[in-house]
Amino acid sequence: MNQNILLCGVGGQGILLAAKIIALAAEKAGFEVTTNEVHGMAQRGGSVTAQLRYGDAVYSPLILERQADVLASMEMIEALRYAHFLKPGGLAAVSTQKIIPVTVSSGKMQYPADAEARLREVFPRLELCDCLDAAIKMGNAKLANTILLGTLSAGLAGIDLPLWESAISECVKPAFVEANLAAFRFGRKENER
């Protein structure tokens, strides 16, 4: 059994922390784990991706096109940008957040008004979650990535809930552990509906 996960978003959205948590949870479950990150122009609002593979025998961190079991995106257009990695029947867990790129704010392009409709067309198995709004209601916008992590966790095999919670507790600063655990549980519950 192998699982392939592609995380994507924009710099500052917590993609790399989410990848670290998934990797640690998979290690705790006894799997081999490999990861790969692309930061790009992350500090200037650029695209960020992380590829993770775990299973009984994993030899490379790279995911081929149409091989990801889960594609998780913190931004709607980023999900569309990396859609070609998701295998048929794979889970797309996508935050409804819109981050306007420089090409749009400068007037050279337009953000698609029909982004949600495009997502529904491209991803038959789609879990949309307003992660940012939920995180703000929890008191900290930075919890959005952990909410999405909870949403995608239900689509991953072989990692029990206590292992997820242990990995979060080890990866997050002590002052923010309880808030992140609550955010994770919220996201997971949203996916189970």
Image: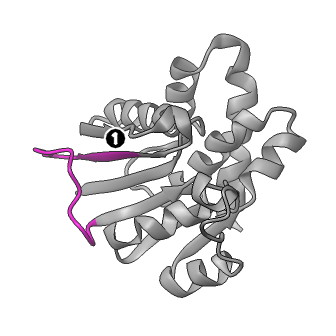
Question: Is residue 8 left or right of 65 when viewed as pictured?
Answer: right
Disc 1 marks which residue?
Answer: 38
Q: Is residue 82 visible?
A: yes
Quadrant position of residue 30: top left
Position of residue 18 measured from the top left corner of the image (x, y, whole percent): 50, 37
In the image, what residue occupies the spot 68% across and 81% down? 114
Q: How is the image coloured?
A: one colour
Q: Is residue 144 above or below residue 180?
A: below
How would you classify the magenta stretch by its main secondary structure?
loop
The percent position of residue 137, horizontal first and vertical second, equals 89, 43
Q: Which residues are magenta?
A: 49-67
In the image, taking residue 44 as reference, residue 177 lies left or right, namely: right
Horizontal placement of 183 versus 92: left or right?
A: right
Which part of the image, by quadrant, shows the C terminus?
A: bottom right
Q: Is residue 91 magenta?
A: no
Q: Quadrant of residue 75?
A: bottom right
- Three-letter residue code for mark 1: Val
Does residue 162 appear in this view? no
Q: Is residue 93 above or below residue 175?
A: below
Q: Quadrant of the N terminus?
A: bottom left
